[in-house]
Amino acid sequence: MIKNGQKKILLYVFVLIVVTFMPLAINNKMFQHTLVLVMLWAGLAMSWNLVGGMVGQVSLGHSAFFGIGAYVSTICYIYFKVSPWLGMVLGGIISVLFAILISYWTLRLKGIFFSMVTIAFAETVLRVILLVCEKAGVPYGINIPYRPSVLNMTFDSQLGYIYVGLLYLLIILFISSKIKYSKMGYYFSAIKESEDAALAVGIRVRKYKVFAMAISAFFTSLGGTFYAQYLLYVDTASVFDIGNIGIQMALLAIVGGSGFVFGPIIGALLIVPLRELVLTYFGGSFQGLHLVLYGFILILMVTYWEDGLAKLLVNVRYFSRRQINESFRS
Amino acid sequence: MDQFLQLAVSGILTGGIYILMASGLTLILGAAKIVNFAHGEFIMLGMYFAYWLFTQRGISPYLSVILAIPIFAVIGIVYNKLIIKPTLKKPHLSQVFATLGSQIVITNMALFLWSGDFRSITTPTSTKTFKLGSLFLSQTRLTGFLVAVLIMVILMVFLQKTITGKAINALAQDLRAAQLIGADVDKLIYLILALGISLAGVAGVLLLPQLYAYPSIGLQFVLMSFVIVVLGGLGSMPGAILGGLLVGIAESFVGFINPSLKEVAYFLLFMLVIVIRPDGLLGVKGSHEEALR
C-alpha cells in the first residue's frame, strides 16, 4: 500500500520528469518559447505572491524591481564585461535595497494607499532611469551581444533557457512553500488578516512586512535579468512598464489563486499561452485586443471567483479523497 | 520675477482643469469609498468625445462640454451597475482589480478602435494670447480655466446647499452614520458615480484644446488625480481645488526646469504627503482611515 504522503512525492517526481524531458521531445519553436515565458511568469507571479498574496500588501509597482534586474545586469555585462549571473545578483541586491526603502516608507499605509505609493514609486524609478539614460548617453533600447555560453547566460537554443527558467521556477516554488508553511508564513497570514491583531499578539509586523517585500523584490529582479538575457534586448520603457509587467504579475497570481503557493503557476499556465496566442494571431491588426481580453478576465475573476482557479483543483482533490473514504465505510 | 509669475499663472490656469479631474475622483473616493483606477480613462474618453465632435461636426469643445455632462453621467451609472456594485461587498482587493481591469479594457479598446496616434485639434483661438500687464495668458487655457471654475462653483453650491449634496457630504464623513440617519446609500452612490464620471468627461473635453489625446493618457490622468485628491484630502472639494492648483503650479515650474521630471515632481510630492499627512492638506482628520473601511 502506498501511503498518501508518498503518493504526493511520486506525483511531484512524475511531473518533474515530464517537465524536464518534454522540451526535448517537442521541437516546436513556438511551444518552447511559450514554455520559457510561462516559467518566467510563473516565477514572477509567485514572487509577487510572497508579498501580495501572503502578506496582503498589494504592490502594483513590482515592475521597478523587474526593470532594475534587467538593467543592472545588462549594464554590467555590456559596459563592465561582468557575467550576467553576477550582474543578476547585484541587480537583486539593489532591488532589495529599494524594497527595504519603499517598505519602510509605507509601513503605516494600508490598502489602497499602499498600492498607490507602489505605483508612484515605480513610475518615479522609470522616469529617473530615462533621465539618467539621456544624460549618460545610454540608448533607450539596448542590444545585448550574442555570445552563447553558460557564463554569459546566453544559449544558442531555447533548451538552455528552458532549463534555466525551470530552475528559476523551482527555486521560487521551493522557497515559497517553505515560507508559507513555516512560522514566518503564519505571521504573514496573520498580518494579512488583521495587522492590528497581529501587533497585539506580539508579531513584529514591521520586520516581516519589510522582509517579505525584500524577498519578493529579489526574485522579481532575477526574473528581470533572465528576461533581458532571453530577449537579448532591453527596452527601457518596456521593462519598467507598470501595466505590462507589474500589474500582470499581480493578475497572474490572483487569477491563479493568491492563497495557494502553486496558484500563480496555474495563472501563468493559463494566461501566458493565451496571451501569446492572441498576440500572434491578432498582434498586428488588432492592437491591444489581447489586453482587452485580459481586462475582462480580471474583472470576471475578481467579481465571481476571488479564490482563483487553484481552488478548483483543491476542491477536486478533497472531494475524491472523501469519496474514497466513504466507499471504504460501506 | 516676471518669469516666475508667468509660470505660476500658467500653472494656475492648467490647474483649473486638474481640479475638475480630481473633484470627480474625490467624490468617488471620499464619499462612495470606491477606488476608481479607471478614472483617467473617462477623462481620456472625454478628450476623444470632444475630438470626434470637433473633427466630424465642427462643434467647439466649449459647446461639447454641455453635451458631455449628461452622456458621461449615463456612462457613470452604467459603470456603477456593471463594475462597481458587484464588487462593493467584496474584499477591497476585488474592487481595486475590478476597476483596474476596467482601466485595461477601456484603454485597449480605445487603442484598438482609434489607434495609438496622437490626436490634437486647433481651434480658431488656439494661438491667441491675452496680455495682462506683463503676463501672457493663452486664450485656450484661460477659457478652459473659466469653464472649469463655473462648473466647480455650480458643483459646490449643489453640495453645500441642497439636501442631496449634504447627504453626499455625510457619506464622506461617515458612511455608516449616514446610513443610520436614513441616507439611501445605493441611490447616492449611483449619483456620486454619475457626477464623478461626468466631471471626468468634462475635464477631458476641456483638456483637448491644450493636450493631445492618445489611448494611454488615462494612466497619467488617474495617477495625477489620485495625487491631487490625497494632497487635498479625501472627499474635500476645497482640498481638490487647492490640490489641483498646487499640482498645476508644481508641474509648471518643474516642467520649466526639466520636462521629463514633471511627473516625478508630483509623485514625490504624493509620496511625501501620504506619509506625513495622509488626511491631506484640507481633509477631515481621519478621513483616510474612513476610506479604508
Image: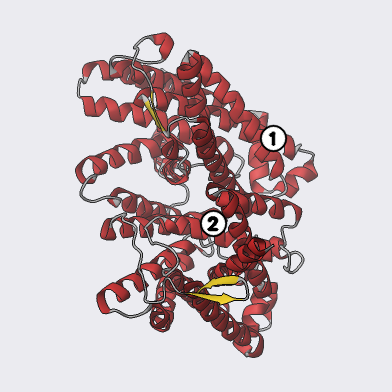
Does residue A174 appear anywhere in the picture? yes
The residue shown at (61%, 65%) is B6
In this rendering, is residue B61 above or below A298? below
Q: What's the image's color scheme?
A: secondary structure
Locate residue A50, reporting x and y percent.
56, 35
* SS at badge 2: helix
In the rendered image, the quadrant that contains the N terminus of chain B is bottom right
Say which residue appears at 41% left-offset and 40% top-offset.
A319
Residue B172 or B161: which is nearer the viewer?
B161
SS for callout 1: helix
- Which chain does the numbered disc 2 sit on? B
Residue at far bottom of view: B162
Task: Please give left or right for residue A238 compared with residue B162 in the image.
Answer: left
Q: Can residue B189 be seen at all in this image of the molecule?
A: no
Residue A208's mark?
A: 1
Q: Nearer the viewer, mark 1 or mark 2?
A: 2
**Residue A257 place in picture, x, y as percent:** 46, 42
Q: Quadrant of residue A148?
A: top left
Distance from label 1 to label 2 (Cα)?
29 Å
Q: Nearer the viewer, residue B244 or B78?
A: B244
Residue occupying the point 53% across, 27% down: A219
Q: Amino acid at mark 1?
A: Tyr
Quadrant location, the C terminus of chain B: bottom right
Q: Which residue is mark 2?
A: B223
Report the residue at 71% width, 61% height from top: B289
Image label count: 2
Residue lying farthest to the front in this orientation: B134
User: In which chain is the residue bearing label 1?
Assistant: A
Residue type (three-letter) at the residue carrying disc 2: Leu
